[in-house]
Amino acid sequence: MAEVVGIIEQQTAPAEETQRTTDGFHLVIDALKLNDIDTIFGLVGIPITDLARLAQAEGMRFIGFRHEQHAGNAAAIAGYMTQKPGICLTVSAPGFLNGLTALANATTNCFPMILISGSSEREIVDLQQGDYEEMDQLNAAKPYAKAAYRVLHAEDIGVGVARAIRAAVSGRPGGVYLDLPAKLLAQTIDAVMAQQSLIKVVDAAPRQLPSPASVKRAIDLLKGAKRPLILLGKGAAYAQADAEIRAFVEKSGIPYLPMSMAKGLLPDTHPQSASAARSFVLAEADVVVLVGARLNWLLSHGKGKTWGAPKQFVQIDISPTEIDSNVAIAAPVVGDIGSCVTALVAAIDEGFTKPSVEWTGAITERKSKNLAKMAATLEKNPSPMNFHSALRAIRDVLKTRPDINVVNEGANTLDYARSIIDMYEPRKRFDSGTWGIMGIGMGFAIGAAVTSGKPVVAIEGDSAFGFSGMELETICRYDLPVCTIVFNNNGVYRGTDVNPTGGKDVAPTVFVKNARYDKMIEAFGGVGFHATTPEELTAALLEAIASGKPTLINAVIDEAAGTESGRLTNLNPQSAAMKK
Ligand code: ADP
């Protein structure tokens, strides 16, 4: 029983009672630990400060942030990396709402996480009598979470945590909200009964086998294909079925394209990678196998000019309702990716021929042409640096360290880095994801560093970095091996816009000129670098990685470089209209 005797009772309960009772605080920690959850990302305050203290006292890691959104993003990426729900702990109302952004993003991206928030008293909240940080958090969370639960009685904490874990990781993973009113945490309960109420979740994410008929249908479709293509999404990376996916790609001989977070599932240098001929293969393929990738905006919804002639799809996904969400899917294969891909590999028999040389040769030709064009662009050495020359320097360093985690966000910084920086190992690239959002940078970097124990290089647009920049203090406080590279071109998209009225205010997209982001990290004891050439950038990055310390490189980019919204100009109709 030693484990259930803790800080709170020691402070409040008489000695013999301490032997017999425990409370909500202890039970929450016990329930998490029982389910092998060892880390909490969060931000303390009323009513969860003691919960965080207790977690640490009981041997869990508590990583405290400066803003809940970044704690939530760290939890979400930890969930993606480990298939265990990442835990984010926040205070009520505003803290909860800050965390909710990350929870919604996790749900959208299919990352398993649990947002645990303290909340005010139900009796007062429900009568809207004006409590401290009053808010009906459960109902606020529901539309943005895969599931949301509230626990009112200490004896239900075990069930609440078990339900949250199952909901987060089973089927299509997502974000779960767990509401813990302050009163619940302080409730005392018989210690033996409390221990018996806890649940160790068994087989939280059961395998889901595809039906044999669906596998046959998919293989038959592929047998008739002339120009097949495999598209790997981050669902495939999440599934940790790396060997099975490689076997499917290599045994079938089908060229493949990785979505951005699936880069590295197979090394980007793999001969069957069609990344350098992306537009060509998307337009020309006749049968496309989607493996854990949705036909959302990132894939032009499976239609239109990008996709050229009409084509047929095989879609492997754990969520049956994803099928036909944008276009007709001729051969759905519903199940977990490991099981589905294994079944497909087993069904590749003598009747299955590898794609024709006509198809693979055309891809190779297109790839060589595009790679030569890109090499010429990358070789240029303009002064000041542009995105390409800076990314060439980073690419060459990262090539020597395939184990390094890469975080990437921005507009142009994201677009260019995605295609220039090759990845060699699975689940090492973390970026703006399904929403295409800014603000994930430092949260993902901290989550990745804490979870993997490996270095992180965060390649950040200067605007994107601003959303989470204060977490540099968190990085320094925990002495994490994170090197943040800020692509500094003095503004959102670029720094050259002017106020058309000639007034004192700068244009909406412009920042302080020649800002020294490297000085920010020095305020917290980290090491800052200022790089104005690719050579300086290379030297700084090598030194930063070798140090294993918190570092930031202010990479000065030509302020005229960069296009509006990166490559998403089509999603920014106003700017097109204003330019007319
Ligand atoms: P990307 O953005 O890389 O294209 P998406 O996030 O759009 O990837 O798609 C991921 C898909 O993978 C989702 O539809 C999700 O249901 C699916 N998925 C996630 N985990 C698994 C799994 N273990 N097995 C099968 N499908 C999965």
Image (cartoon, grey):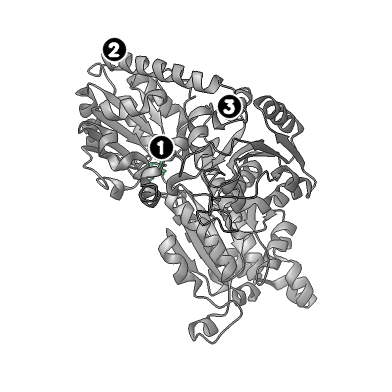
From the viewer's side, name the closer residue of 328 and 530: 530
How packed is label 2: few (under 14 Cα within 10 Å), some, or many (20 or more)? few
Between disc 3 and disc 2, whose residue precedes? 2
Residue situated furthest front in the rendering: 502
Q: Quadrant of the N terminus?
A: bottom right
Q: Which image quarter has ligand 1?
A: top left
Q: In which quarter of the image is residue 548?
A: top right
* Residue positioned 50% across, 85% down in the render: 128
Give the mark toward the camera: 3 or 1: 3
Looking at the rendered structure, the kind of residue marked 1 is Gly
| In the image: residue 190, left or right of residue 476 | left
* Residue positioned 44% across, 54% down in the render: 107
Looking at the rendered structure, the kind of residue marked 3 is Ser
Task: Please state the total of marks drawn on the protein image.
Answer: 3
- Tag shown at residue 377: none
From the viewer's side, name the closer residue of 432 and 325: 432
Q: Is mark 1 on a helix, strand or loop?
A: loop
349 vs 4: above or below: above
Q: What element carries label 3?
A: helix
Circle 2 is placed at which residue position? 357
Check contact, mark 3 vs mark 1: CB within 8 A: no
Asked whether mark 1 lies closer than 8 Å to ligand 1, one says: yes
Circle 3 is placed at which residue position? 389
Percent position (x, y) of residue 488?
A: 62, 41
* Residue positioned 50% across, 53% down in the render: 500
How packed is label 3: few (under 14 Cα within 10 Å), some, or many (20 or more)? many
| In the image: residue 350, left or right of residue 101 | left
